[in-house]
Image (cartoon, helix red, strand yellow):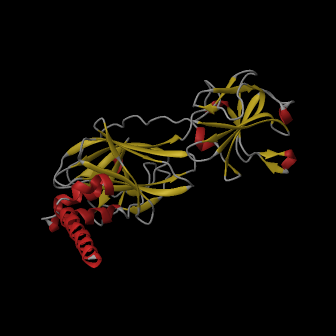
Amino acid sequence: MQSIKKYWLFTSILIAIIALFITYTVKPALFDFILKPSNRTIYERSFKDNPEKLERWNNLLSIAAKDQVTINKSTSEHVVTTFQKPFTASYLIDLQLGEVLVSTIASKSSWILEARNLSGDLLQDAQLKNDTLVLNYTPNKDIKIRIILQAKLETESQTEFKIYTAPQYDFPVAGKGNSAIQSFWGASRGGGSRKHEGNDVFAPKGHPVVAITYGTVSSIRNRGLGGKQVWVKDYDNGYLHYYAHLDDWIVNEGDMVWSGDTLGYVGNTGNAKNTPPHLHFGIYKNGSAVDPKPFIWKTQVPENTISLPQLNNPLANGFAANLRTEPSSSSDILQDVKTAPVSIIGNTGNWYHVRTTTGLSGYMHKSVLVEQ
């Protein structure tokens, strides 16, 4: 009797597994809330009965994955996709610990936007917010990543694409910003015997010093080089935030604080007694100091770029027709295009973003392109 029950239990489980497998094969979207597939995976389901389109789509991704276009922290690009020439490109960017990558494209559903590492692994997918695809990626170390932008097939669109970095935290001195930081990470201290392990933010004595994120006051001290100091542990990732040379504090150990809450006031206690009042601000990760500047350096969203004319059958004019990694005459040259035809896929300022007939992508100044 016991063996019969086990048999039926095993059979029931097997039938359930087979039923789930068949259901997933026929209707994979039913499992999306569990498996959380990427936007690319979801879109590729539309090619289930059209392997030729899927191959074309994947070939475009392969082309973009080889691009050497480089972004220097902030850019805005006018991009164009058509039925005949679907947009595909990637952009390399170096991120520092403490920076947040932000990338946006104004579009409801025509684009795939994602961040990948240099091995091609997906790091982050963009999410649709108010008719704009928004990509946010926070690294846990210094890293070079590849941002991939790919238009869905058989769509037409002209829109604005932006890439920039933002600080992970708010600023630690109320009402102040980048210009108040007058001594940075790595500056010489003690006659060259040590390096500065933080940023010095200058403000009048008694000016409010504030929490930069949600956390707990882990320690309050009045000793050593830092004088009066407050330590806050960040709940999200365990970093310790160090506020030193305070004139005084108004929190207690164990207090929970939110971004913008006053912790104390700017002073010149500790070894800062002979210097103008300032906050020494530091961040510690796993017991070691890290450069706090990327965590707090305020940035601006790039403005929309101008839109250059879409030239018909453009080609290089043969005079200094250089294809470059960035929209700048001082950036690296990828290739001398000479008089070869190119395809325009967008522009930033007075620089066209083009792709050669061999698939190489880069920037060319508008002065070196002509219509055939």
Q: Which residue lies furthest to the front in this view?
A: 1
- Image quadrant holding the C terminus, namely bottom left
Q: Where is residue 336 in the image (x, y as percent from the top left)?
A: 39, 62
**Left or right: residue 37 compared with residue 142:** left
Closer to the camera in the image, 222 or 81: 222
- The answer to whether 280 is drawn above or below residue 277 in the figure is below
Residue 197 versus residue 117 in the image, above or below:
above
Q: Which of 106 and 310 is in front in this view?
A: 106
Regarding residue 154, the answer to whether it shows in the image is yes
**Residue 315, position in %: x, y?**
27, 56
Residue at 86% x, 40% y is 224
Residue projecting furthest to the bottom: 3
Left or right relative to 100: residue 340: left
Residue 70 percent coordinates (x, y): 45, 54
Q: Which residue is drawn at 81% across and 29% down?
A: 268
Residue 4 coordinates in the image, percent (x, y): 24, 77
For the N terminus, the quadrant is bottom left
Residue under the point 44% across and 35% down: 301
Q: Does the rendering let one see residue 161?
A: no
* View extreme (left): residue: 49
* 327 to the left or right of 222: left
Q: How many marks?
A: 0
Residue 362 vs residue 55, the one in the foreground? 55
Quarter where residue 120 is shown: bottom left
